[in-house]
Amino acid sequence: MNRLGLGTLGGDHVQKLTAPFLCRLKSLVPLTPREEYFLEALELPAHAFNAGGHVYAEGDGDLPPWIVGAGWACRLRVLPDGRRQIVTFFLPGDTIRLGDVDHPAIQSTILAMTDLTLLNASRLAEAVARADDSIANIVQACRVTFIWSQAQLLDHVLRLGRLTALERMAHLILELHYRMQDAGLAQDGRFPLPLTQSQFGEALGLSLVHVNRTLQQLRREQLIELKPGRIAILDRERLALLCDFRKPAI
Amino acid sequence: MNRLGLGTLGGDHVQKLTAPFLCRLKSLVPLTPREEYFLEALELPAHAFNAGGHVYAEGDGDLPPWIVGAGWACRLRVLPDGRRQIVTFFLPGDTIRLGDVDHPAIQSTILAMTDLTLLNASRLAEAVARADDSIANIVQACRVTFIWSQAQLLDHVLRLGRLTALERMAHLILELHYRMQDAGLAQDGRFPLPLTQSQFGEALGLSLVHVNRTLQQLRREQLIELKPGRIAILDRERLALLCDFRKPAI
DNA sequence: CGTACCATTGACAGCCCTCAAAGCAGGTGG
DNA sequence: CCACCTGCTTTGAGGGCTGTCAATGGTACG
């Protein structure tokens, strides 16, 4: 299909590309020096995808597990008449098909939402599957990561089923904020947000036009500040109150 | 809270209570005689819950994994203002907290939707975790079961995000049909459907009134027949076409 | 300087919700 | 046996949230 740019990048970027993943792990569990060294020594091969390209198309065979190094991806369902529903976002530091299950029965597609660099995590997956004692914390962190991804799916169901457009938007923004923060990519409520309003709509079950009006309302009420590609949360408490957002505890 | 009827039932019912689970396993993988004997020899203890009672309340400690013997349950999220969203249905033969993860972070409640009998599956869970070679097919079936439950979650997201009320209803009815069929509880498109219209609404993100009107439309168009507690699908093909329902393949 | 993509704005329609009231069982007690 | 209650279903009326259609502006890029 529309698969692009599968070339391997030079090794000098790899170090930085693992930073979000490492940061996220450390936000979940403390790592021993040995475990940190283990992760750095893995030298995961990087692959680049262009914005809009398929990481995984329905019907593809087995693919390796990935770690998102840079850029955003999503899991997507498409209807015959063109309606699209984004099911999951994959942010830097997130894992794809690691613990999080994948299988043809899932009937979904994984798409690069921006230019994207993924790290092939096969070697990590093998070590985690063996559950070596020497990386017990990493294994535990992967388990927690999986539980969180489940919680995020339930959050998504709640948003789509029971929240108004304004609430949905606030709730999603807060979720993305905390996830970017755990990956070390948010400072002081500000973080990169490379989504178009159309993509917001595809995630939240709203039309592009209504997404636009909803975002304007959040701005009018001094809750967020939005520049192309970046967002700033101005009043996290009021935003959380608006949509009953609760960050899950470990 | 509203926890009721935790008494243990007599052992003579247990045999029949495992039938839906056994039937579902066999619909996924062939079982060896030895595996069938293994399951029957487990003698899982049964617990009864009254309709409306909590199986698991947010904040409860660890509970055993369950197999649904009879009756329906659901996983539910509740908002402070009373809005409710059903996230997952648990039908006879389904497993709860087995493979399917649970954790306080999931922030949800498990409720008995009807009078309910659950089987404590701790002994099964231990055997599956050990991954004994002698029950390889059962282990495999549990893996597939988990993948299906993930696919059902994605289906639910798609329904809530992108389908109209009529489509949502048709899609859910078909999902429930196939699940009941795999459990050996549907014949010829007819199966017990103990949900109230209000519960339908809580699952599909619709109001009670609109559920009522939507069901009437499905009846008017000769797609389903509905009696209290039972449903019959009159034209499965047309119903599936209406909502792009695709049964996931193994 | 077009072209393409994204954000923005207005008008209008439609799906779905809320409020309200009336049937319709099944169960309970007098 | 009947009255009453409770919970579920059904029906009507009206309103609001959100979608669709259409057009404009802005910005990056070739």
Image: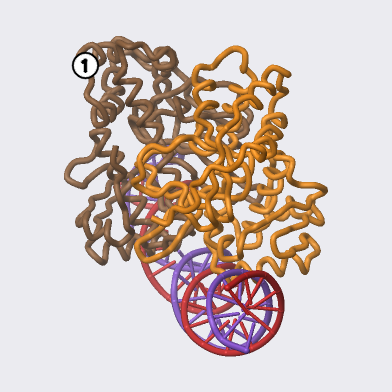
Chain colours: A orange, B brown, C purple, D red
Instruction: Name the residue: 39% across, 14% down.
Output: B131
Going by the image, does B1 lie left or right of A103? right
- Picture coordinates of residue A205, whole percent (x, y): 52, 60
- Picture coordinates of residue B203, whole percent (x, y): 46, 49
Q: Quadrant of residue B240?
A: bottom left
Going by the image, does A83 lie left or right of A212? left
Which quarter shows the C terminus of chain B? top left
Instruction: Name the residue: 68% across, 22% down.
Output: A37
Going by the image, does B84 lie left or right of B125? right
Q: Amino acid at mark 1?
A: Thr
| Residue A150 in view | no
Dot 1: chain letter: B
Instruction: Name the residue: 69% across, 60% down.
Output: A229
- Picture coordinates of residue A77, whole percent (x, y): 43, 53
| Residue B210 in view | yes
Task: Please name the residue that numbered disc 1 is placed on.
Answer: B32
